[in-house]
Amino acid sequence: MGMLEGKVVAVTGAGRAVGRAIAICCAAEGASVLVNDLGSGAAGEGADQGLALDVVAEIEAAGGRAIANTASITDPQGAVSIIDDAVQAFGRIDGVINNAGFLRDSIFHRMNQVDWNDIIDVHLNAYFAVSKAAAPHFKEQGSGAFVHMTSTSGLIGNFGQANYAAAKAGVIGLSTSIALDMQRFGITSNCIAPFAWSRLTQTIPTDTEEQKQRVARLMEMKPEKIAPLAAFLCSDQAKSVSGQIFGVRRNEIFLFSRPQPIRSVHHAAGWTPETISEVMLPSLRSSFQPLQRSGEVFSWDPI
């Protein structure tokens, strides 16, 4: 028996790459899986319903149970249909893995409102909608697990991804709030920042030697490396794990911190702009965090 035997898990964006690997892993661990994928392109364009059906066929060929759902998670009714279809087909819902998304990268001063709105909609608003649809079922049965994909773009930073970074930072707040609000009902909520080569990372430029080396490292990180942690977080063995932010990079698993106070200064007379400049700034400057990109923090080769 697998770790997810008897459970039902819905995975969004499960037609390709990380989502596909997670769906297949969950099925191999015994879960009945709802495979959701609209089949849009890397920038959110178009639709290909065959992607979800192909993953279902692959799971069934291996002896697992799965159904396809091709709704867009940005459509509120589509988000609800993901949970409704899982419950109708398998009788319950035990895990929701919010993975779907796409990129619209642009340097900030050139980013337009449409690209901002679309990325926030798919990576944050839709994650809320799918999670909200599952929440009453989880509450009624006194159990359930949410797993949300975040990104080091939101945790650390990256060039040309203000929309994506803002959404993925928002996912952390969403997950933490779900974990706090629903812990009394036996429900967990965690985040994973995946490092993996996929259609989204294929948009990374390779104009410089540094960029070429970065892409070469990314190509070593297969989507299948992300899947075991996502499956584990939906299992009963992870009931005590909630409100956490993990990262997976090839064979490495990281635990990230949430922002915490580093240092403080006190001024008994109260602060003025002048005393802030004269006292606060020199007191705290040595603890200021540098501006960095994800690739600078994770500078060693994947292991």
Image (cartoon, helix red, strand yellow):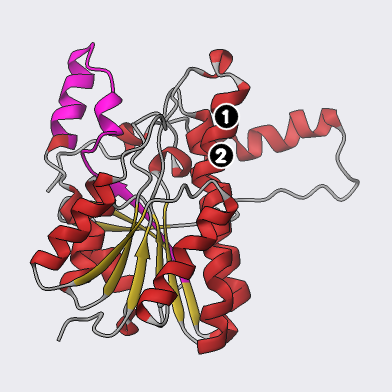
Percent position of residue 57, x then y = 16, 59
Describe the element under mark 1 as helix, strand or loop.
Answer: helix
User: Extreme left residue here?
Assistant: 62
Q: Please, what is the three-letter code of the amino acid marked with disc 2?
A: Ile
Please check the rendered image and state whether residue 120 is part of the magenta-colored stretch, yes or no: no
Q: Is residue 91 left or right of residue 128?
A: left
Q: Which mark is residue 116?
A: 1
The image position of residue 23, as x and y in percent, is 25, 61
- For the point 47% across and 30% down, which residue is it? 291
State the SS at label 2: helix
Who is closer to the viewer here, 144 or 179?
144
Instruction: Give the residues drawn in magenta, as a range.
Output: 189-218
Q: Going 14% across and 39% down the picture, which residue do you hit?
A: 301
Q: Is label 1 in contact with label 2 (beta carbons under 8 Å)?
A: yes
Residue 137 can be seen, yes or no: yes
Residue in the image at 38% along x and 55% along y: 12
- Above-or-below relation of 93 to 258: below
Q: Position of residue 77 (x, y in %)?
A: 57, 55
Left or right of residue 302, residue 188 in this image = right
Q: Residue 120, labelled with which disc?
A: 2
Does the segment drawn in magenta span residue 207?
yes
| Residue 199 as seen in the image, left or right of residue 60 | right
Q: Is residue 244 visible?
A: no
